Image (spheres, grey):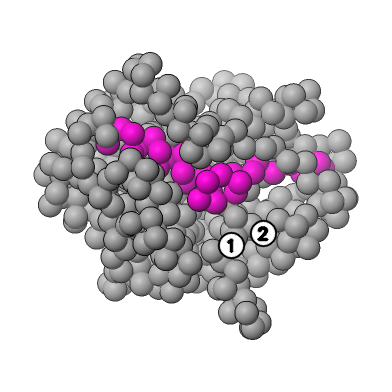
Amino acid sequence: MDNKNTDFEPNEMPSKNGHFGDYGGMYVPETLMTPLFELSEAYEASKADPEFQSELKEYLREFAGRPTNLYYADRLTEYCKGAKIYLKREDLLHTGAHKINNAIGQALLAKKMGKKRIIAETGAGQHGIATASICAKLGFECVIYMGEEDMRRQALNVFRMRLCGAEVRGVSAGQKTLKEAVNEAMRDWVTNVRDTHYIIGSALGSHPFPMMVRDYHRIIGEEARAQILEKEGRLPDEICACVGGGSNAIGLFFPFLKDASVRLTGVEAGGRSIEKGEHAARFAGGRLGVLQGAKTWILQTEDGQIDSTHSVSAGLDYAAVGPEHAYYKEKGRIDFGYATDAEALEALQTLCKIEGIVPALETAHGIAYAIKKASEMPKDGILICNLSGRGDKDVQEVARVLGEDI
């Protein structure tokens, strides 16, 4: 695929009905249409409100710890014997991942709207702890929905959420993972829309959430673009990031969309294998459908039932991808590949041993691609990988999978 399409013009905004081309939309119960329209109006107003924007920047700086470093991984570069590898260090943010960017933005918006209660879903727990942290800071009542299997895999983050005062409600339906947690959060929101805001944690769901989440995370790419120009005097040849729903990836990619010379690559979860039910790579085995508010690429059966998914990483174990990713995939602007569980585990250990950095299992999928790709590129090439989160939360699960004592 050739990304040097100078005629490509990405949509800054979805249509008024929330569509990115054929993707996105507002496929929700009628009871949610009014709060979604109110949310969209409030968000649009907040973008033109200097006081809101000043408060947001202050929280991102003083509470979250922005800007994050663009780190030259010199030993990993030497190991790959190819292109220079830079890591955008979102793992250094407060709570340990990029998720805090969006949680702060939506929590401040909820405060502006007069909401008193916050709910959220979480898979790997990073969105959950980000939400719990900002709710503690702003004084919100906070409820986090989490699949029981993910609670087992991410026990550390469950305890962290509870330490911050959040109520963590386990979900025992289905595969007991992220899809089921989203279902329960949406049921809660339908019941409590008057006083409750639902902070969706990824660039998925009904409009305006994909747009909002992307906008709150685009600071990742804005910083990275300025930083690489300062460090190298030119743009990178390629940037990559792991993709579950796709928040960290679209945040990194968006400011580079019009730079035709920069290849953009999303890395999905290849799971145990690319066989049906063994992975969560939507572009390698899915098709168009509607799930949890949006039309997008989904892993589903011939009669439209949602397929079982699997990933060693709780945060990538989801049957749908954000609709904006599906739109740019169709337009030929973003490429997508996948890394298997085994490749992600190997990449995690490699980064630990060579750079002394422990990435999240989700992030390790992007690292696996970066290692492979950099080794194929010339030494004067430049590759940026989004190090979207740190792996403290995953150490116990990694040890279990590798059969080691802890």
In the image, 10: left or right of 166?
A: right
**Res 358 label:** 2
Quadrant where the N terminus sits is top right
Give the residue type at disc 2: Val
In the image, 171: left or right of 60?
A: left
Q: Is residue 159 visible?
A: yes
Quadrant where the C terminus sits is bottom right
Is residue 203 positioned above or below 233 on the image?
below
SS for dot 1: helix
Check contact, mark 2 vs mark 1: CB within 8 A: yes
- Of residue 366 and residue 289, the one placed in the foreground of this image is 366
Q: Is residue 324 visible?
A: no
Boundaries of the magenta span: 83-110
Q: Residue at x 52, y 32 (%)?
A: 61
Inter-mark Cα distance, 2 to 1: 7 Å
Residue wearing tag 1:
392
**Res 77 label:** none
Q: Residue at x 54, y 64 (%)?
A: 393
Q: Residue at x 14, y 35 (%)?
A: 34
Q: Residue at x 85, y 55 (%)?
A: 79
- Of residue 317 and residue 133, the one placed in the foreground of this image is 133
- Of residue 93 and residue 63, the one placed in the foreground of this image is 63
Task: From the top left corner, tell me how far across and down residue 191 is, in percent.
Answer: 12, 52
Task: From the top left corner, tell me how far across and down residue 101 is, in percent.
Answer: 47, 39
In the image, 219: left or right of 39?
A: right
* Mark closer to the chain start, 2 or 1: 2
Instruction: Count neighbours of disc 2 (C-alpha within 10 A) and say few if under 14, some if 14 to 19, many if 20 or more.
Output: many
SS for dot 2: loop
